[in-house]
Image (spheres, rainbow, N blue to C red):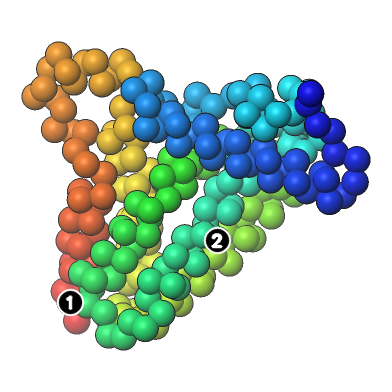
Amino acid sequence: MQRRARSPEAKLRRTEDLLDAARTLDAARTLAASRGGVRHLTLAAVTEAADLHPSAVRRYFDSKEELLLELAERGWHEWSLLLTARLADARDLTPERTADAVAGTLAAQPLFCDLLTHVPLSLEGDVDIERARRFKTNSFTSYNAIVDTLTGAGTMTGAQVQDLITVALELTANLWQISHPTPTLAALYAQNPRWEHVALDFEPRLTRLLRATATGLTAGG
């Protein structure tokens, strides 16, 4: 029997159930042979996993895009918390170690990495303006906290850290999708191994490229 929220507390719990279901389904798709990530996530699958009636999702989210944008917003916050915890006792980090921290904490959040591709393409543009405003406000709050954490723990300037984060976000959005091919591409790579070089492991390549970026940003002094 599907459940229906009848109080603010119950509604909040159902909202969390839906978000948890989306996280779980995305993780299963990422690990399974039939990969696809959030682009193949459906509201019907989410509501079924959350033990809710398919029509119930509209009481909590206006669309799949709004649900995923909520997860992206939380991903920003969680990234900020991960970096703060990792660098709590760090001082005078080299540019390379700063890059390691950025790459490692991003790789620890598979769903966020997947969502970084979709936020600018569709998610933030396909919700109403107030929801988009809330996402921008909260994600930039997390962004500022990340910049402050990295600047305070290392030897890079604030401007250099901002450039490093810009590159990290762009690389992550691209490399995550390449490193987690669809079934069609996975079959194609199996038939043509020489093409598979573009689908190398995500974290090692991200770390290597961010290290090079951080070193280059600070090479002039």
| Residue 191 can be seen, yes or no | yes
Three-letter amino acid code of the residue under disc 1: Gly
Three-letter amino acid code of the residue under disc 2: His
Q: Distance between the residues labelled 1 and 2?
A: 32 Å
In the rendered image of this protein, does residue 104 appear above or below residue 81?
A: above
Helix, strand or loop at label 2? It is: helix
In the rendered image of this protein, does residue 161 appear above or below residue 221?
A: above
Kindly indicate the quadrant of the structure image that contains residue 180. Answer: top left
Kindly indicate the quadrant of the structure image that contains residue 65. Answer: top right
* Camera-side residue of 111 and 149: 111
Q: Which residue lies furthest to the front in this view?
A: 1
Q: Which residue is drawn at 17% across and 61% down?
A: 212
Question: Horizontally, is 175 left or right of 38 in the view?
Answer: left
Where does the image place residue 67, in percent across and percent down from the top left?
Answer: 65, 39
Image quarter where the C terminus lies is bottom left
Q: Residue furthest left?
A: 194
| Among numbered discs 1 and 2, the one appearing first in the sequence | 2
Q: Residue at x 43, y 40 (%)?
A: 114
Kindly indicate the quadrant of the structure image that contains residue 47. Answer: top right
| Residue 121 can be seen, yes or no | no
In the rendered image of this protein, does residue 213 appear above or below residue 39?
A: below
Say which residue label 1 marks: 220
Where does the image place residue 2, in percent across and percent down from the top left?
Answer: 78, 26
* Camera-side residue of 140 and 10: 10
Dot 1 and dot 2 residues touching (CB under 8 Å): no
Helix, strand or loop at label 1? It is: loop
Say which residue label 2 marks: 77
